[in-house]
Amino acid sequence: MCGIVGFVGKQEAAPILLDGLARLEYRGYDSAGIAVYSPQDGLRVVKAKGRLQNLAEKTNGGADVHGCIGIGHTRWATHGEPSDVNAHPQLSESGRFAVIHNGIIENYAEIKEFLQEQGVTFVSQTDTEVVAQLLDHYYKDDMLDAVVKVLHRIEGAYAFGIVCEDCPDRLIAARKDSPLIIGYGEDFNFLASDVTAVIKHTREVSYLDDGDIAVLTASGVAIYDSLLQRQDKARHQVDWEVSAAEKGGYEHFMAKEIMEQPEAFRKTISPRIQEGAVVLDGLCFDRETLERMDKLYIIACGSSYHVGMVAKYTLEKLLRKNVEVSLASEFRYCDPIVTERTLCIVISQSGETIDTLAALREAKRLGARVLSIVNVVGSTIARESDDVLYTWAGPEIAVATTKAYSTQLSVVYLIGLYFARILGTVNGGEYAAILTELQALPEKMEQVLAQKETIQYYASRYFNHESIFFIGRNVDYAVGMEGSLKLKEISYIHSEAYAAGELKHGTISLIEPGALVVALAGHTPLFEKLMSNVVEVKSRGADVLGVTVASRGAAMEKAVDGALIIPDTLPMLLPSLEVLPMQLFAYYVALMRGCDIDKPRNLAKSVTVE
Ligand code: AGP
C-alpha cells in the first residue's frame, strides 16, 4: 500500500529518490518524504502531505537536499491521517534513525506504551514511528544489532528501509509479508518496493524473502536470513523496457493499458500454443493427478476475483469438475473444505495482495496444491506457489486493472484447455475450435477498442448518473461485476452488478424513471432471457445501455436506448471482448467527471495490508 525506495552510491541521492518515488506513486499517494544524509547537513528529512509533486517543489526537485545516501516513501495512510508529521520517513527522538515502512506493525500500541513509560516522546499517530523509537532504544553502537532486536520485538507485515546517522555509509532493508527488492549497480545499490523504482538504473535485482535482512553500501550488498546467516541471493535480470512503465503519449496509464490489451493477450498465449496444443511452462499434471483432484478452489480479490468468477464457468464446462470461487478475505476465515485433493488457483496481478497471500498459505497448510496466475515476476505469491503461470502483461501502473485482468482470463482459458486435454473431457474438434477462436481474440479485441468514440459518446450521455446497475446472466454477470467495479473505483459513481434473474427478488424496487441499467447480453444461449429482463426494467422507466454480439445486434438495438455491439465469439471466451467496452465506459465517465483516473482517491495498486 506504500512505496519505498533507498539509494546509496556516489551520486546525489535526493533526485534519484524522487524519481523512484514517482515510479512507485501508484502504490500510495497521500503524502511522501525523503531522508538523506550528508556530512555537512547530517540526516535531513523533508516530508509533504499530498502528491509527490508537493515534495518535489519543497526540495527544488531534490536539488536542495544533499548527500549520496537516503530513503524515500510515498504513503497510503493506515495509522494516522495524511499529514507532514505522519508521512514517512519516521524519525527516532534522538534524530539518529530514519525509517520508511510498507506494512502494518500489529503490536505497535503496546510497544508505544512501553516506550512512553521509558520517557520517549512520540510525535505521530503512525505505527511506524515505534520502529524508529525502538531502534533508539536498542542501539548501542551496532546498527545491524539494533535492527535485529527490533525485528524480534515487532509483529506484523513490513518492508523497511533504515538509515542511521552514526553509520552514514549503509542502509538496512528488512522484509516480512511486504515486497522488497534489491537493485544492484557498479558503485551504487537500491532497495525498493518493486522493480519499477530501479529499472531506470539497473536491471539486476534480487527479491528478498520473509526474514531477510540486507545491508547496502555503495560497493556491495550483504543479505542475511533471519538467523543472520549470510546468503547468496539469486540475482535476476528484469526483461521489460523502462518505457513499459511510462505513459507513452497517452493521457493516462489506464488508457495506455486498455489499448495494450490485444498485444498483452498475444504475448501471454502465443508461447503457450505450440503445434495446435497448449503447453504450460513446465507444469506437470498427469491424468491420475487431475482425476484425483475433487475440487478446484479459485481464490482472489477484486478484479482478480471477477476473473475467478469467469473461470468457474469456464473450468466447470471444460473439466466437469467442481469449481469454487472465494474472496481471499473470506476464504481465510470460513474454515474452508480443502484437502490434498484440492487444487487451489490463486489469481493476483501484483502477487503481493496480503489477503490473497494469507489465503494461499492457509490453503497450503490444509494440504492443497497451489497454482497461481500472477503478473509480477518474483512476487511473493509467485514464489510461494507450487506452480506459477505468469501473465505477460508487462508492468500495470494504473490502479484500475485492465490488461492484467485480460491476460489473467487468457491463462484461465489455457489452463482449462490444458487440463481438459489431459482428462479427455473435450474432444479433438472442440479443443481445436476453442484454440482457434482463442488465437483470433486479439484481433477481435482491436475491433472492439476501435469503437472507443461510440463508447465515449454513451459516457457523455450518462456520466452524471449517481447510480448505475449492471445486469447479466452466466459469464455476462461476471463481466458486469468487473464493469461495475471499474466504474466505482475511478468515477466514484455508486454502482452494483446483479445476476439479471435476481432483479425481481428485490433490487428491481430501485429501478425508477431515469435509472441507468447496463444490460450485458453477449452470452447468446441466454440472450432471450436477458432481453426479458431488459423489458422488465424498461417498463419501470429505466434507460438501458445494452451490450451484445453482432448476431444479436439488431434485436438489441430495437429494445434499448443505446447499444454496444461486439464481434461474435464462443460463449466461453466472451468476457475477453465484453469487458473492453466496460473498461472504456468507466474510463470516459471518470474523465468527464474530472476524476484522477490513474490514482483514484482512497485506493492503491497493491493492497499489502489487511
Ligand atoms: C482492480 O481494478 C482493483 N485495483 C483491485 O480490485 C484489484 O483487482 C485487487 O486489489 C486485487 O489485486 P491483485 O490482482 O494484485 O491481487
Image (cartoon, rainbow, N blue to C red):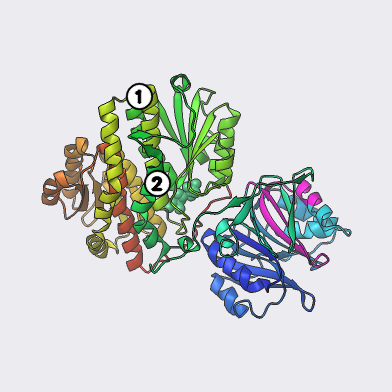
User: Residue 56: x, y in percent?
Assistant: 58, 75
Is residue 424 shown left or right of residue 240? left
Mark 2 or mark 1, whichever is nearer to me: 2
Is residue 376 shown left or right of residue 182? left
Front residue of 200 and 275: 275
Residue type, mark 1 in image: Arg
- Residue bearing mark 2: 407
Residue type, mark 2 in image: Thr
> In the figure, 70 relative to 378: above or below?
below
Residue shown at the point (53%, 42%) measured from the top left: 356
Q: Earlier in the sequence, mark 2 or mark 1?
A: 1
Residue shown at the point (81%, 54%) measured from the top left: 144
Q: Secondary structure at mark 1?
A: loop
Q: Quadrant of the N terminus?
A: bottom right
> In the figure, 275 relative to 293: above or below?
below
Is residue 296 shown left or right of residue 94? left
Q: Quadrant of residue 310?
A: top left
Residue shown at the point (66%, 53%) measured from the top left: 159
Where are the magenta residues, as a range? 148-177
Q: Quadrant of residue 361?
A: top right
Tell me, for residue 89, which label it has, or none.
none
Residue most toward the right? 140
Is residue 77 shown left or right of residue 66? left
Say whether residue 409 is visible: no
The residues bearing labels 2 and 1 have C-alpha atoms spaced at a distance of 24 Å
Q: Quadrant of residue 188?
A: bottom right
Tell me, for residue 320, which label it has, or none.
1
Q: Residues within 10 Å of mark 1 (few under 14, many from 20)?
A: few
> In the figure, 557 relative to 458: above or below?
above
How many marks the image carries: the answer is 2
